[in-house]
Amino acid sequence: MSAIKEKAESLKEEIIRHRRWAHMNPEPGFKEFKTSAYIKEELKKIGLDFRTAAETGIICDIKGNGDGKTILIRGDIDALPLQEDNDVPYKSQNQGMMHACGHDTHIACLLGTAKILSEMRDKFKGTARLVFQPAEEGPGGATPMVKDGAVGDPENPEVDAAIALHVTAGEDMLVNTIGVKDGPLSAGADEIYVEVIGKGGHGSAPHEAIDPVFVAAQIVIQVQGYLSRFVNTFEPVVMTFGKIVGGDRQNIISERVRMDGTLRTFNRDLRKQMYEKLPKLFSDIAKTYGAKAKTEIIPGYGVGINDRVLTDMLRELYGEMYGKAGLIEQEFPTMGAEDFFEFGLDGKIPAMMFWLGGGNKERGMLASNHSNYFDIDEDCLPMGSALLSGLAVKYLNS
Ligand SMILES: [Zn+2]
Ligand SMILES: [Zn+2]
């Protein structure tokens, strides 16, 4: 494994070049045309075959020495609609777009992995499948990639495991560290749209109307009480209404209010139960006041559960390569969502994502992901490539 680490270090300049190119050329989800072309060009230089999937996505198989398992290694490639405020030579060249979630790092680490694995095909069995995925930030590129064959037939998948990293730069995730967590890692996230329908009238005579603003307020308050009383307290659930639109003027009771919310859970069964219980709750609350509530739930990214065998393999690998000091056991999952786990087919294929530390206190690189000041210490890049390559080799030979 030390050979992989050394190889990754020797590629440092090259991996940094990839990261800077991507950082300067951020593109939105499913519009990563230049990014996709850049990656393809680099894969060609390495001499690898690949195919396009989901418009701007790329699937590249690296076959080892003899038959064996297949491991999918994913890197997302999209950026965010945000103006970069870092004053760096590699600053975003696209007005109002920025690699503020670090997916430029993921592209670079995966290209580094492509090079490392292509040069050591005789050292592993089976197949390493590199997946460059569009649109993680929305509307979601993993599911379209799965539909385009990223794991083979979902009924009988040809992929045996899936891995990915995510770079982050907080005070607790400095360069040379990684964050590892068993079990729940990222939440299942669903969109909830509620339309409350009352009866319009004069603001001075609410008894002659049915006020949907009042009903919407009841729903906002009561859903929190419902979740606290009816869901096991050890099962995290978050329900937030982030947007409410209704009304015409201060003295008019309007007919309708529209409420947009997000539902976050870790338990796959509980999530399904909520699909039935929440619309009924909203409808019952509305009924109490003579109104109607129509609810639409659009299922989003699935629950992200890290596979224990893979996290243990990562711990062992990290110890072999870098010692144990920088290994951070993550206590809590995030209620954020991540579509990488779609490649795990809701638990059918073992999947695992870990955090790559990119923060640097002295250099002021501590801004969180999605910040207009997000930046990483590029010293973390070889480690990213080394860990993805090493994990693939370790898994395929296990
Ligand atoms: Zn993000
Ligand atoms: Zn991200």
Image (cartoon, rainbow, N blue to C red):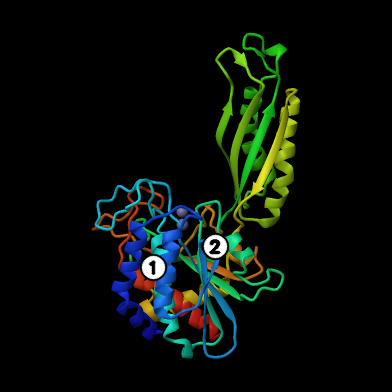
Mark 2 against mark 1, which lies toward the viewer?
1
- Which residue corresponds to the image point at 52% horizontal and 57% vertical from the top-left? 333
Q: Give amino acid for label 1.
A: Ala
Q: Give amino acid for label 2.
A: Phe
User: Is residue 293 positioned above or below 30 on the image?
Assistant: above
Q: Earlier in the sequence, mark 2 or mark 1?
A: 1
Decide which of 243, 25 is in the foreground and name it.
25
Q: Pointer 2: residues within 10 angstroms few (<14), some, or many (20+)?
A: many
User: Is residue 269 positioned above or below 114 on the image?
Assistant: above
Q: Position of residue 220 (x, y in %)?
A: 61, 33
User: Is residue 181 positioned above or below 298 on the image?
Assistant: below
- Which residue corresponds to the image point at 39% horizontal and 68% vertical from the top-left? 108
Which residue carries the number 2 mark?
340
Which residue carries the number 1 mark?
108
Q: Position of residue 321 (x, y in %)?
A: 38, 79
Decide which of 221, 395 is in the foreground and name it.
395
Decide which of 213, 51 is in the foreground and name it.
51
Badge 1 element: helix
Badge 2 element: helix
Q: Where is residue 371 in the image (x, y as percent from the top left)?
A: 37, 48
Spatial CA distance of label 2 from label 1 is: 17 Å
